[in-house]
Amino acid sequence: MGLECERALTFSTRVVLTFPRGGPMPRRPPPSRRRAPRQERAQATVDAILTATARVLLRDGYEAASTNRIAQEAGVSVGSLYQYFPSKEGLVTALMEQHRARSLADFEAGLTSLAGQPLPVAMRALIRQVLAVKRENPRLNQVLHELMPRMRQWGLSDVYSQRLHRMVRAFLAPRFEDLRPRNLDMAVFILVNAVEALCHTALTDRPEYVEDDAFVEEIAALAIGYLRPEPALARPRRATRERVARM
């Protein structure tokens, strides 16, 4: 009887640990790496695996991609791949991190160089930079953009988006007194998401716009008009057709 009680207690403890009060434990976000490469040769292997991940995603799509296919594409064994990446999700996460880190580094350098420029000049230059990044590999940009909802399902926070918002906020903060919006955090949220949405939609639906400087001018006019609109000029009202007809 004592043994049965001990077994029952052990089983109930395991159940409590596995299914805590309030439901199952939330799924942990997949780590992007098992271990970081410390030697040049190991770094070359990691770079080859991530390059292969991008090629397989572009060619086969996320659902058809597998660690076996990616390892074969990279010219390494699956065992070598698993030394650095725990899963397909980890590979995609690491690829996203690599891609966005490079883009953000370029954007940050652009912000620094434009800190003292007038707002219209700086805005046009930054929009050109965003479009230039998207032109580098438009298909990869599209695939990674489509995978963002999956990353949120995995429980991953978009740390690069958060960092981008902080950078833009720091850029606008010294000019705050000259801006129309009174809530700077909200203004940054609106501005960043509006510009990003326009650039991404142009990339997918109107790729000719991405190469057109007039598109840059229009987005810049939209952004500057939101941040610092010019006073509307008083214009005499024109008579409508109905009024003209009655005269």
Image (cartoon, grey):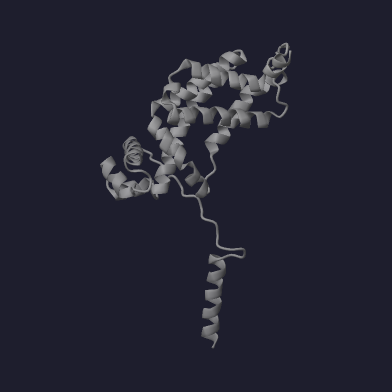
Extreme-front residue of the structure: 246
Q: Is residue 144 visible?
A: yes
Q: Please state the horizontal and vertical placement of residue 226, each as a whole percent of the image.
A: 65, 23
Identified at 55% across, 74% down, the residue is: 12
Q: Please state the horizontal and vertical placement of residue 189, each as a whole percent of the image.
A: 62, 32
Q: Which quadrant holds the C terminus?
A: top right
In this rendering, the count of numbered labels is 0
Q: Please state the horizontal and vertical placement of residue 143, each as a whole percent of the image.
A: 41, 38
Q: Is the residue 221 above or below the residue 84 in the image?
A: above
Identified at 52% across, 84% down, the residue is: 4
Identified at 67% across, 17% down, the residue is: 241
Identified at 62% across, 30% down, the residue is: 190
In the rendered view, does 133 fall on the left or right side of 43?
Answer: right
Between 35 and 246, the one nearer to me in the picture: 246
Q: Is the residue 47 above or below the residue 209 in the image?
A: below
Q: Which image quadrant for residue 194?
A: top right
Between 9 and 127, the one nearer to me in the picture: 127
Q: Which quadrant holds the N terminus?
A: bottom right
Extreme-bottom residue of the structure: 1
In the rendered view, does 242 fall on the left or right side of 148?
Answer: right
Q: Please state the horizontal and vertical placement of residue 157, each as a whole percent of the image.
A: 54, 43
Q: Is residue 112 visible?
A: no
